[in-house]
Amino acid sequence: YFQGFPPPASYQPTRTYHPGVTQFGPQRRAEVLKEVFAQAAAQDTRVAGAFSLFEGEIAIVNTNGLSAYQPLSGAEVSLVFMSDQGMSRVEAFARDPGQIDFQGLTARGLARCALDRDQVELPPGEYTVILEPPCVAEVLGWLSFIAFGSEAFLTGSSFLAGALGERSMGENITIYDSAWEPEAQGLPFDFEGWPKSKVMLIERGVNRGVVFDRVSAAKAGTKPTGHAGPPGSPWGAAPWNLCLAPGDSSLEEMIAGCKRGILVSNFHYVNGYLDTKRALMTGMTRYGTFLVEGGEIRAALKNLRWTESMLKAFSNVVAISQTRTVLSRWGGAAFSIVPALMIEGFTFTGVQRE
Protein backbone atom coordinates (compact mmCIF):
# COMPACT_ATOMS: atom_id res chain seq x y z
CA TYR A 1 0.00 0.00 0.00
CA PHE A 2 0.94 3.68 0.00
CA GLN A 3 4.45 4.06 1.40
CA GLY A 4 4.32 7.80 1.96
CA PHE A 5 6.11 10.38 -0.11
CA PRO A 6 9.77 9.67 -0.93
CA PRO A 7 12.48 11.97 0.47
CA PRO A 8 14.69 14.30 -1.60
CA ALA A 9 17.15 12.47 -3.84
CA SER A 10 19.97 13.08 -6.30
CA TYR A 11 19.87 11.69 -9.83
CA GLN A 12 22.43 10.40 -12.29
CA PRO A 13 22.11 12.81 -15.25
CA THR A 14 20.67 11.69 -18.58
CA ARG A 15 20.33 13.49 -21.91
CA THR A 16 16.69 13.32 -22.98
CA TYR A 17 16.26 16.68 -24.73
CA HIS A 18 17.77 18.04 -27.93
CA PRO A 19 17.02 21.59 -29.17
CA GLY A 20 17.00 20.28 -32.74
CA VAL A 21 13.37 19.33 -32.19
CA THR A 22 12.44 23.02 -32.44
CA GLN A 23 13.99 23.26 -35.92
CA PHE A 24 11.61 20.73 -37.49
CA GLY A 25 8.36 22.60 -37.90
CA PRO A 26 5.59 21.43 -40.25
CA GLN A 27 7.23 23.04 -43.29
CA ARG A 28 10.58 21.32 -42.79
CA ARG A 29 8.95 17.97 -42.09
CA ALA A 30 6.91 18.35 -45.29
CA GLU A 31 10.09 19.06 -47.25
CA VAL A 32 11.77 15.95 -45.88
CA LEU A 33 8.76 13.78 -46.70
CA LYS A 34 8.39 15.33 -50.15
CA GLU A 35 11.76 13.84 -51.07
CA VAL A 36 10.67 10.46 -49.71
CA PHE A 37 7.50 10.58 -51.83
CA ALA A 38 9.47 11.57 -54.93
CA GLN A 39 11.91 8.68 -54.61
CA ALA A 40 9.04 6.25 -54.06
CA ALA A 41 7.04 7.58 -57.03
CA ALA A 42 10.07 7.07 -59.28
CA GLN A 43 9.77 3.34 -58.50
CA ASP A 44 5.95 3.19 -58.82
CA THR A 45 5.66 2.82 -55.05
CA ARG A 46 3.24 4.50 -52.67
CA VAL A 47 4.10 5.66 -49.15
CA ALA A 48 2.05 6.03 -45.98
CA GLY A 49 3.11 6.69 -42.42
CA ALA A 50 3.87 9.38 -39.89
CA PHE A 51 6.67 11.73 -38.88
CA SER A 52 5.82 13.01 -35.42
CA LEU A 53 7.68 15.11 -32.87
CA PHE A 54 7.17 15.57 -29.16
CA GLU A 55 8.58 18.02 -26.67
CA GLY A 56 7.73 18.20 -23.00
CA GLU A 57 8.79 18.38 -19.39
CA ILE A 58 8.28 16.19 -16.34
CA ALA A 59 8.41 17.73 -12.88
CA ILE A 60 7.74 15.96 -9.58
CA VAL A 61 7.63 17.72 -6.21
CA ASN A 62 6.28 16.69 -2.83
CA THR A 63 5.91 18.00 0.71
CA ASN A 64 8.99 16.09 1.85
CA GLY A 65 11.14 18.43 -0.21
CA LEU A 66 11.68 16.19 -3.22
CA SER A 67 12.11 18.08 -6.49
CA ALA A 68 12.77 16.31 -9.79
CA TYR A 69 12.73 17.81 -13.28
CA GLN A 70 13.58 16.50 -16.75
CA PRO A 71 12.93 17.92 -20.24
CA LEU A 72 12.11 15.50 -23.05
CA SER A 73 12.15 15.57 -26.83
CA GLY A 74 11.82 12.99 -29.54
CA ALA A 75 11.05 12.20 -33.14
CA GLU A 76 9.30 9.09 -34.41
CA VAL A 77 9.16 8.02 -38.03
CA SER A 78 7.17 5.13 -39.47
CA LEU A 79 7.00 4.65 -43.24
CA VAL A 80 5.12 1.93 -45.13
CA PHE A 81 6.08 1.43 -48.79
CA MET A 82 3.46 -0.25 -50.99
CA SER A 83 3.61 -1.65 -54.50
CA ASP A 84 0.98 -3.61 -56.41
CA GLN A 85 2.45 -6.86 -55.06
CA GLY A 86 3.97 -6.20 -51.67
CA MET A 87 4.99 -3.81 -48.95
CA SER A 88 7.69 -2.95 -46.44
CA ARG A 89 7.96 -0.88 -43.28
CA VAL A 90 10.82 1.09 -41.78
CA GLU A 91 10.90 3.07 -38.55
CA ALA A 92 13.23 5.16 -36.44
CA PHE A 93 13.36 7.07 -33.14
CA ALA A 94 15.75 9.78 -31.97
CA ARG A 95 15.82 12.60 -29.44
CA ASP A 96 17.11 14.85 -32.24
CA PRO A 97 15.12 14.56 -35.50
CA GLY A 98 18.24 15.66 -37.38
CA GLN A 99 19.84 12.32 -36.50
CA ILE A 100 17.26 10.32 -38.45
CA ASP A 101 18.66 9.05 -41.75
CA PHE A 102 15.69 9.54 -44.06
CA GLN A 103 17.73 8.74 -47.15
CA GLY A 104 18.84 5.44 -45.66
CA LEU A 105 15.34 4.59 -44.43
CA THR A 106 13.86 5.32 -47.85
CA ALA A 107 16.47 3.28 -49.70
CA ARG A 108 15.96 0.33 -47.39
CA GLY A 109 12.17 0.54 -47.55
CA LEU A 110 12.16 0.69 -51.35
CA ALA A 111 14.62 -2.18 -51.68
CA ARG A 112 12.60 -4.43 -49.39
CA CYS A 113 9.32 -3.49 -51.06
CA ALA A 114 10.80 -4.40 -54.45
CA LEU A 115 11.76 -7.84 -53.07
CA ASP A 116 8.27 -8.48 -51.69
CA ARG A 117 6.68 -9.79 -54.88
CA ASP A 118 5.50 -13.14 -56.25
CA GLN A 119 5.08 -14.50 -52.72
CA VAL A 120 5.20 -18.25 -52.32
CA GLU A 121 3.85 -20.47 -49.55
CA LEU A 122 6.10 -22.24 -47.09
CA PRO A 123 4.65 -25.16 -45.11
CA PRO A 124 4.45 -24.87 -41.31
CA GLY A 125 7.34 -26.28 -39.31
CA GLU A 126 10.49 -25.37 -37.45
CA TYR A 127 12.90 -23.12 -39.34
CA THR A 128 16.01 -21.09 -38.74
CA VAL A 129 14.72 -17.53 -38.45
CA ILE A 130 16.39 -14.14 -38.68
CA LEU A 131 14.42 -11.57 -36.69
CA GLU A 132 15.05 -7.93 -37.48
CA PRO A 133 15.05 -5.38 -34.62
CA PRO A 134 11.30 -4.49 -34.79
CA CYS A 135 10.45 -8.16 -34.11
CA VAL A 136 12.84 -8.32 -31.16
CA ALA A 137 11.46 -5.06 -29.74
CA GLU A 138 7.90 -6.42 -29.99
CA VAL A 139 8.86 -9.51 -28.00
CA LEU A 140 10.71 -7.50 -25.35
CA GLY A 141 7.73 -5.18 -25.04
CA TRP A 142 5.56 -8.16 -24.14
CA LEU A 143 8.16 -9.52 -21.72
CA SER A 144 8.19 -6.17 -19.92
CA PHE A 145 4.59 -6.86 -18.83
CA ILE A 146 4.37 -10.64 -18.50
CA ALA A 147 7.80 -11.26 -16.96
CA PHE A 148 9.97 -8.30 -15.95
CA GLY A 149 7.43 -6.18 -14.03
CA SER A 150 6.72 -6.42 -10.31
CA GLU A 151 3.02 -7.29 -10.72
CA ALA A 152 3.70 -10.44 -12.77
CA PHE A 153 6.52 -11.42 -10.43
CA LEU A 154 4.49 -11.02 -7.23
CA THR A 155 1.40 -12.79 -8.59
CA GLY A 156 3.52 -15.69 -9.82
CA SER A 157 2.58 -15.41 -13.50
CA SER A 158 6.12 -14.43 -14.54
CA PHE A 159 8.59 -17.17 -15.48
CA LEU A 160 11.02 -15.45 -13.09
CA ALA A 161 8.74 -15.99 -10.07
CA GLY A 162 10.42 -18.49 -7.77
CA ALA A 163 13.18 -18.97 -10.33
CA LEU A 164 15.75 -16.22 -9.71
CA GLY A 165 19.22 -17.61 -10.19
CA GLU A 166 18.00 -20.31 -12.57
CA ARG A 167 18.84 -20.46 -16.27
CA SER A 168 15.97 -19.76 -18.67
CA MET A 169 17.77 -18.60 -21.83
CA GLY A 170 21.04 -19.13 -23.69
CA GLU A 171 24.38 -17.90 -22.36
CA ASN A 172 24.57 -15.31 -25.13
CA ILE A 173 21.40 -13.52 -23.97
CA THR A 174 21.60 -10.58 -21.56
CA ILE A 175 18.54 -8.37 -21.06
CA TYR A 176 18.53 -5.32 -18.81
CA ASP A 177 16.77 -2.02 -18.21
CA SER A 178 18.99 1.06 -18.46
CA ALA A 179 18.39 4.77 -18.97
CA TRP A 180 22.09 5.40 -19.70
CA GLU A 181 22.89 3.65 -22.97
CA PRO A 182 25.06 5.34 -25.66
CA GLU A 183 22.32 4.86 -28.28
CA ALA A 184 19.59 6.59 -26.23
CA GLN A 185 18.88 7.73 -22.69
CA GLY A 186 15.73 7.83 -20.57
CA LEU A 187 14.38 9.47 -17.44
CA PRO A 188 16.75 9.35 -14.42
CA PHE A 189 13.79 8.95 -12.03
CA ASP A 190 10.37 7.31 -12.01
CA PHE A 191 6.94 8.88 -11.59
CA GLU A 192 7.32 8.96 -7.81
CA GLY A 193 10.61 10.82 -8.13
CA TRP A 194 12.60 7.79 -6.97
CA PRO A 195 16.07 7.50 -8.60
CA LYS A 196 16.12 4.99 -11.42
CA SER A 197 18.58 2.09 -11.28
CA LYS A 198 20.04 -0.04 -14.03
CA VAL A 199 18.46 -3.46 -13.48
CA MET A 200 19.87 -6.74 -14.76
CA LEU A 201 16.91 -8.94 -15.73
CA ILE A 202 18.60 -11.82 -17.58
CA GLU A 203 22.39 -12.14 -17.35
CA ARG A 204 24.03 -14.61 -19.72
CA GLY A 205 20.80 -16.58 -19.72
CA VAL A 206 20.31 -16.60 -15.94
CA ASN A 207 17.26 -14.99 -14.27
CA ARG A 208 18.55 -12.08 -12.18
CA GLY A 209 15.68 -9.78 -11.25
CA VAL A 210 12.66 -7.64 -12.00
CA VAL A 211 11.88 -3.95 -11.55
CA PHE A 212 10.03 -2.51 -8.54
CA ASP A 213 8.28 0.64 -7.44
CA ARG A 214 8.05 1.51 -3.75
CA VAL A 215 4.78 -0.33 -3.11
CA SER A 216 5.80 -3.57 -4.82
CA ALA A 217 9.27 -3.43 -3.27
CA ALA A 218 7.69 -3.27 0.19
CA LYS A 219 5.55 -6.32 -0.64
CA ALA A 220 8.61 -8.22 -1.86
CA GLY A 221 10.80 -7.12 1.03
CA THR A 222 13.37 -5.53 -1.25
CA LYS A 223 14.48 -2.08 -2.44
CA PRO A 224 12.71 -0.06 -5.14
CA THR A 225 14.51 0.21 -8.48
CA GLY A 226 12.88 3.45 -9.62
CA HIS A 227 10.31 2.04 -12.04
CA ALA A 228 6.97 3.40 -10.83
CA GLY A 229 4.57 4.17 -13.65
CA PRO A 230 2.31 7.21 -14.00
CA PRO A 231 -0.41 7.63 -11.34
CA GLY A 232 -3.25 5.20 -11.97
CA SER A 233 -1.15 2.90 -14.15
CA PRO A 234 -2.64 -0.64 -14.07
CA TRP A 235 0.66 -2.35 -14.88
CA GLY A 236 2.61 -1.70 -11.70
CA ALA A 237 6.35 -1.22 -12.03
CA ALA A 238 7.61 -1.92 -15.54
CA PRO A 239 10.90 -1.48 -17.42
CA TRP A 240 10.83 1.59 -19.64
CA ASN A 241 14.20 1.27 -21.34
CA LEU A 242 14.68 -2.39 -22.20
CA CYS A 243 17.98 -3.38 -23.76
CA LEU A 244 19.29 -6.62 -25.24
CA ALA A 245 23.09 -6.81 -25.22
CA PRO A 246 24.75 -6.79 -28.66
CA GLY A 247 26.74 -9.58 -30.24
CA ASP A 248 29.46 -9.61 -32.88
CA SER A 249 27.53 -10.36 -36.07
CA SER A 250 25.53 -8.30 -38.58
CA LEU A 251 22.26 -8.79 -40.43
CA GLU A 252 24.18 -9.30 -43.67
CA GLU A 253 26.39 -11.96 -42.07
CA MET A 254 23.35 -13.75 -40.67
CA ILE A 255 21.77 -13.93 -44.13
CA ALA A 256 25.05 -15.02 -45.72
CA GLY A 257 25.48 -17.76 -43.10
CA CYS A 258 21.93 -19.12 -43.36
CA LYS A 259 21.63 -22.37 -45.34
CA ARG A 260 17.83 -22.33 -45.29
CA GLY A 261 15.62 -20.15 -43.19
CA ILE A 262 13.19 -17.25 -42.96
CA LEU A 263 13.95 -13.53 -42.69
CA VAL A 264 11.21 -11.66 -40.81
CA SER A 265 10.97 -7.87 -40.99
CA ASN A 266 8.07 -7.24 -38.59
CA PHE A 267 5.65 -9.02 -36.29
CA HIS A 268 1.93 -8.23 -36.19
CA TYR A 269 -0.97 -9.01 -33.82
CA VAL A 270 1.26 -10.57 -31.18
CA ASN A 271 -0.42 -12.19 -28.18
CA GLY A 272 1.87 -12.86 -25.23
CA TYR A 273 -0.73 -14.21 -22.83
CA LEU A 274 -0.92 -17.82 -24.08
CA ASP A 275 1.27 -19.22 -21.28
CA THR A 276 3.23 -16.56 -19.42
CA LYS A 277 5.20 -19.10 -17.36
CA ARG A 278 6.77 -20.27 -20.63
CA ALA A 279 6.60 -16.86 -22.32
CA LEU A 280 4.56 -18.60 -25.03
CA MET A 281 3.47 -16.12 -27.70
CA THR A 282 1.81 -16.17 -31.09
CA GLY A 283 1.62 -13.65 -33.90
CA MET A 284 1.89 -13.02 -37.63
CA THR A 285 4.71 -11.83 -39.84
CA ARG A 286 4.16 -8.65 -41.84
CA TYR A 287 5.77 -6.08 -44.14
CA GLY A 288 8.14 -8.52 -45.79
CA THR A 289 8.86 -12.17 -45.02
CA PHE A 290 11.53 -13.87 -47.10
CA LEU A 291 12.98 -17.31 -47.80
CA VAL A 292 16.76 -17.44 -47.37
CA GLU A 293 18.66 -20.25 -49.08
CA GLY A 294 22.38 -20.66 -49.62
CA GLY A 295 23.12 -17.35 -47.94
CA GLU A 296 20.84 -15.29 -50.19
CA ILE A 297 17.25 -14.04 -50.19
CA ARG A 298 15.61 -16.34 -52.74
CA ALA A 299 11.90 -15.51 -52.59
CA ALA A 300 9.23 -13.50 -50.85
CA LEU A 301 6.88 -15.53 -48.66
CA LYS A 302 3.23 -15.22 -47.79
CA ASN A 303 2.80 -14.06 -44.22
CA LEU A 304 3.15 -16.79 -41.63
CA ARG A 305 1.70 -17.42 -38.19
CA TRP A 306 4.19 -18.37 -35.51
CA THR A 307 3.67 -19.82 -32.03
CA GLU A 308 6.72 -20.11 -29.84
CA SER A 309 8.04 -20.01 -26.29
CA MET A 310 10.44 -17.12 -26.02
CA LEU A 311 12.36 -19.11 -23.42
CA LYS A 312 12.99 -21.75 -26.08
CA ALA A 313 13.68 -19.18 -28.79
CA PHE A 314 16.14 -17.21 -26.66
CA SER A 315 17.86 -20.48 -25.77
CA ASN A 316 18.47 -21.19 -29.46
CA VAL A 317 20.01 -17.89 -30.58
CA VAL A 318 23.07 -18.55 -32.76
CA ALA A 319 23.92 -14.98 -33.82
CA ILE A 320 23.33 -11.46 -32.48
CA SER A 321 24.09 -8.29 -34.40
CA GLN A 322 26.66 -5.85 -33.10
CA THR A 323 24.58 -2.86 -34.17
CA ARG A 324 21.48 -2.11 -32.11
CA THR A 325 18.39 -0.12 -33.11
CA VAL A 326 16.41 2.27 -30.89
CA LEU A 327 12.66 1.75 -31.27
CA SER A 328 10.11 3.76 -29.32
CA ARG A 329 7.30 2.32 -27.21
CA TRP A 330 4.16 3.98 -25.87
CA GLY A 331 4.36 6.95 -28.19
CA GLY A 332 7.99 7.74 -27.43
CA ALA A 333 7.58 7.72 -23.64
CA ALA A 334 9.79 4.63 -23.53
CA PHE A 335 12.07 2.75 -25.89
CA SER A 336 13.83 -0.53 -26.56
CA ILE A 337 17.42 -0.89 -27.78
CA VAL A 338 17.72 -4.16 -29.66
CA PRO A 339 19.88 -6.07 -32.15
CA ALA A 340 18.82 -8.51 -34.84
CA LEU A 341 18.75 -12.20 -33.84
CA MET A 342 19.30 -15.47 -35.69
CA ILE A 343 17.43 -18.33 -34.01
CA GLU A 344 17.34 -22.04 -34.79
CA GLY A 345 14.19 -24.16 -34.59
CA PHE A 346 11.60 -21.34 -34.54
CA THR A 347 8.07 -22.71 -34.91
CA PHE A 348 5.77 -21.48 -37.68
CA THR A 349 2.25 -22.88 -37.42
CA GLY A 350 0.32 -21.59 -40.42
CA VAL A 351 0.14 -19.51 -43.59
CA GLN A 352 -2.00 -16.41 -44.10
CA ARG A 353 -4.82 -16.99 -46.57
CA GLU A 354 -6.30 -14.29 -48.74
Image: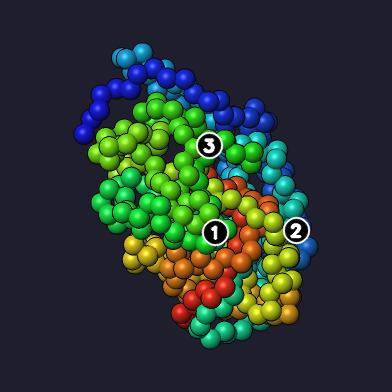
Dividing the picture into quadrants, the one containing residue 239 is top left
Precedes in sequence: disc 2 or disc 1: 2
Outermost residue, front side: 165
Mark carried by residue 43: none
Precedes in sequence: disc 2 or disc 3: 2
**Above-or-below relation of 171 to 95:** below
- Say whether residue 81 is left or right of residue 44: left
Q: Where is residue 314 in the image (x, y as percent from the top left)?
A: 51, 63
Give the CA distance from mark 2 to mark 3.
31 Å
Give the CA distance from mark 3 to mark 1.
24 Å
Residue plotted at (57% across, 85% down): 121
- Asked whether the viewer can see residue 106, the reply is yes
Outermost residue, left side: 1
Kind of residue sitting beneath label 3: Ala
Residue plotted at (47% across, 51% down): 202
Kind of residue sitting beneath label 1: Glu
Residue wearing tag 3: 179
Disc number lying in front (3 or 1): 1
